[in-house]
Image (spheres, rainbow, N blue to C red):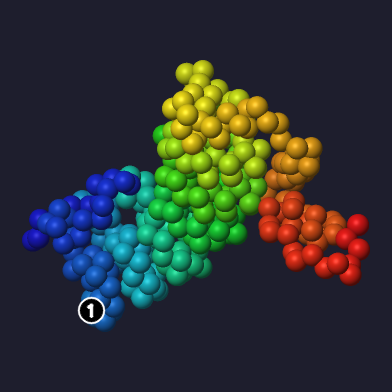
Amino acid sequence: MEITRARPSLFGDIAHGLGFWTDRSAVHEAAAQGKALQLQKLIQGGAAVNIVAVDSITPLHEACIQGQTQCVRLLLDAGAHVDARNIDGSTPLCDACAAGSLECVKLLIQHGATINPPLFTFSPLHEACMGGNSDCVQLMIDVGALMEAHDCHFGTPLHVACARQHFDCAKVLLNAGANVNAAKLHETALHHAAKVKNVDLIELLIEFGGNIYARDNLGKKPINYTSQGSPTNICLEFYENTPLSLQQISRIALRTALGRRALDDVSKLGLPNRITCYLSYQPPPDLDLDFDYF
C-alpha cells in the first residue's frame, strides 16, 4: 500500500503527490484527483465511501480540499457523511471553504452540512477567511454562519481575515454586521491590521467603528505595534488626533444598533438614496440635479 498521510495542519500546503499521505484508498485517490468515472465505478462496485485515512480524512474531505465538485456530488449521493470530522476537527465544509470552492460549499449545504460547529472551534467561516475566499464568506453569512464564532486560538473570523490581510473578506464581514471591536485576549482586529502594517485595513476598520484606543492584554494600543514614521503609524496617529465626524459616528451607532440586520433594515427606512448608500457604505449614486434629495 502506498505510504501517505493526511493533511498535516490548517496552514500547511496540501501535499498531494509528494508521498506524504498514508492509508489512502482507491476511493480517496479518485476523489482527490477528480476522476469521477473511476469513482462512480468504485461506488457501484461496493467501495465504502466513508472509509477514513490515518488522520480521519474521508474521501469527501479529499474531494472538497481539491474542489472536485462532481466527486463531491457522487460521494454525497452515495451516502458520504456530510459532517465527518478529521483529526483536526475539520469537516468537508471547512475544507471546501478553505479551498474556495463555491460549488462544493453549495452542495454540502444542500445536503445538510452543519454551518456552525461547537463553540471555540475553527468554523467553515473562519476557513473561508483564512483562505481569502470572499465569495464563500458571503455565502456562509447568507446561510446563517455566526460572525462572532470564537476560535480559542484565532479569535473571530474578522481577526483571521485581518491577520491574513484579506481586505475583501474583512469588508464582507463588516458590511454584514460583524463586531469590529470583538476581542481575543483584549486584542481586536485593528491590532492585527497594525501588526501586519496594512493601512487599507486600518482605515476600513476605523470607518466601521474600530476602537483605536483599545488595549490588548499587554496594555498596547494598535499604534504601539507600528514603527515611528511608518505609513501605519502616521495613519493611526492621524485618527488619534482627528475625531470622527458626527456623520460618521451616527452611521456607526445606527449600524451597531441594527447589527447583522443593518443592510436589510436601512433599505426599508424610506430614506433618500444617497443617505441609504452612505449608511450602507456604498458609493453614492450619480447626482441628479433635477431631483430634490432632501
Horizontally, residue 101 falls left or right of residue 280, namely left
Q: Position of residue 235 (x, y in %)?
A: 56, 35
- Count all numbered tags in the image, as a single digit: 1
Horizontally, residue 91 falls left or right of residue 27, namely right
Does 180 sit above or below residue 100?
above
Residue 234 versus residue 140: which sits nearer the camera?
234
Q: Which residue is mark 1?
A: 38
| Quadrant in the picture for the C terminus | bottom right
Q: Position of residue 12 (x, y in %)?
A: 27, 48
Q: Residue at x 63, y 51 (%)?
A: 175
**Residue 44 falls in which quadrant of the image?**
bottom left
Q: Residue at x 45, y 57 (%)?
A: 133
Does 213 sit above or below residue 195?
above
Residue 157 versus residue 90: which sits nearer the camera?
157
Horizontally, residue 291 falls left or right of residue 123, namely right
Q: Residue at x 29, y 78 (%)?
A: 36
| Quadrant in the picture for the N terminus | bottom left
Q: Quick one: which residue is furthest to the top in this view?
A: 219
Q: Residue type at mark 1?
A: Gln
Residue 158 in sight in this render = no
Dot 1 lies on which element?
helix
Q: Position of residue 211 (x, y in %)?
A: 62, 31
Residue 15 in sight in this render = yes
Q: Residue at x 41, y 61 (%)?
A: 100
Q: Residues within 10 Å of mark 1 (few under 14, many from 20)?
A: some
**Residue 122 falls in which quadrant of the image?**
top left
